[in-house]
């Protein structure tokens, strides 16, 4: 009975906002897919979120996302769907981005695979950003674009800077003012030195807001303290819709009482997240429903 009450309490708190997450799952291929103890943790992590960006999907057979969706919809509250990018990367090494999203909370308006063909600056990205335009009728900001990014560590400074060109491209393509950039930017430690931030337009233009700061640690290993994974926002309405202090790093190792070895079998990164406020009308209606349940 206590567990049921705690679940209701968590659920009622969660529905008052839209939780958006990003997770580098680290080499999510066939080997990881066949390990139930790992899949269970990944499903639990995704089910906390209304939108989840997954990175480092390595799937030649297009089996992982449908498999994960089946598991997710079999044991989570609310049905999910997904959109997935092309297989991206130079030469033989390929990865995919995927967005899993809760159908009752958001819908996908359009997707766009950035072509990385800017004249004079072709092939700037190791894994070209995958861009998704979401509509969210129950939140204060009703639509927003998410630009996903997993940089090559040695090229992190250049690739983070190049996101500004992606922003300009998408802004011309779609009529929106609300942008979220998120993913594994490798934006810290030895890959982005302090003196290099001045060369990154997404950082030195003041209308972009970074909500995971430089002192954060998004890594699982206790021997590292690096803010690799980031969220950057653009658009006054979107920025004002953020739930205060909701930018967070989800320590699944601690939350699920895992050993370091067990956690690293899932990933060497922790997920990052933040929340958008719902409209007053929706919040009041959900509050009444929750009081009735409890």
Image (spheres, grey):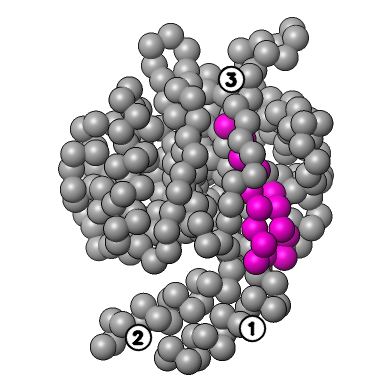
Query: The C terminus appears in which quarter of the rendering?
Result: bottom left
Identify the element where label 3 is drawn: loop
Other-residue count near label 3 (Cα within 10 Å), few / some / many at <14 / 14–19 / ≥20: many
Q: Residue 92 occupies which quadrant of the picture?
A: top left
Compared with 137, 36 (above or below) is above
Is 225 in front, or is 185? 185
Residue depicted at x 56% and y 50%: 215
Categorize mark 2 by other alpha carbons within 10 Å: few (<14), some (14-19), many (20+). few
> Is residue 209 shown left or right of residue 192?
right
Pick whichever, 280 or 216, lies toward us: 280
Q: At numbered mark 1, what does the secondary structure look like: helix, strand or loop?
A: helix
Report how far apart the C-alphas of labels 1 and 2 lie in the structure.
Answer: 20 Å
Q: CA distance from mark 2 to mark 3?
A: 47 Å
Which residue is label 1 attached to? 284
Give the residue drawn at x 39%, y 66%.
77
Q: Is residue 250 left or right of residue 191?
A: left
Asked if disc 1 and disc 2 are in contact, CB closer than 8 Å, the reply is: no
Based on the picture, tell me whether residue 2 belongs to the magenta stretch.
no
How far across and how far down the image is residue 246, in percent?
58, 64
Tell me if residue 178 comes above or below residue 245 in the rendering: above
Query: What's drawn in magenta, residue-wise?
Result: 130-144
**Is mark 3 in CB contact (under 8 Å) with mark 1?**
no
Q: Earlier in the sequence, mark 3 or mark 1?
A: 3
Residue 79 in sight in this render? yes
> Which residue matches tag 2?
5
Q: Label 3, on which residue?
A: 125
């Amino acid at each position: 009975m206590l567990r049921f009450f705690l679940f209701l309490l968590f659920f009622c708190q969660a529905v008052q906002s839209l939780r958006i997450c990003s997770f580098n799952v680290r080499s999510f291929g066939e080997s990881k897919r066949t390990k139930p103890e790992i899949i269970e943790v990944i499903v639990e992590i995704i089910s906390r979120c209304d939108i989840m960006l997954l990175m480092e999907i390595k799937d030649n057979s297009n089996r992982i996302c449908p498999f994960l969706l089946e598991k997710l919809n079999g044991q989570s509250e609310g049905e999910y769907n997904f959109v997935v990018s092309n297989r991206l990367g130079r030469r033989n090494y390929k990865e995919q981005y995927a967005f899993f999203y809760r159908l009752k909370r958001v819908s996908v308006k359009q997707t766009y695979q950035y072509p990385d063909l800017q004249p004079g600056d072709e092939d700037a990205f190791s894994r070209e950003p995958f861009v998704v335009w979401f509509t969210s009728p129950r939140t204060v900001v009703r639509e927003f674009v998410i630009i996903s990014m997993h940089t090559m560590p040695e090229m992190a400074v250049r690739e983070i800077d190049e996101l500004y060109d992606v922003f300009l491209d998408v802004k011309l393509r779609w009529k929106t003012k609300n942008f979220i950039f998120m993913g594994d930017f490798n934006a810290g430690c030895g890959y982005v030195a302090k003196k290099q931030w001045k060369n990154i337009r997404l950082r030195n233009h003041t209308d972009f807001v970074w909500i995971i700061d430089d002192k954060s640690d998004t890594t699982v290993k206790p021997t590292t303290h690096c803010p690799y994974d980031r969220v950057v926002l653009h658009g006054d309405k979107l920025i004002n819709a953020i739930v205060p202090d909701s930018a967070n790093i989800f320590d699944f190792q601690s939350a699920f009482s895992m050993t370091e070895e067990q956690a690293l079998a899932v990933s060497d990164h922790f997920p990052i997240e933040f929340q958008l406020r719902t409209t007053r009308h929706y919040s009041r209606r959900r509050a009444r429903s929750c009081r009735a349940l409890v």
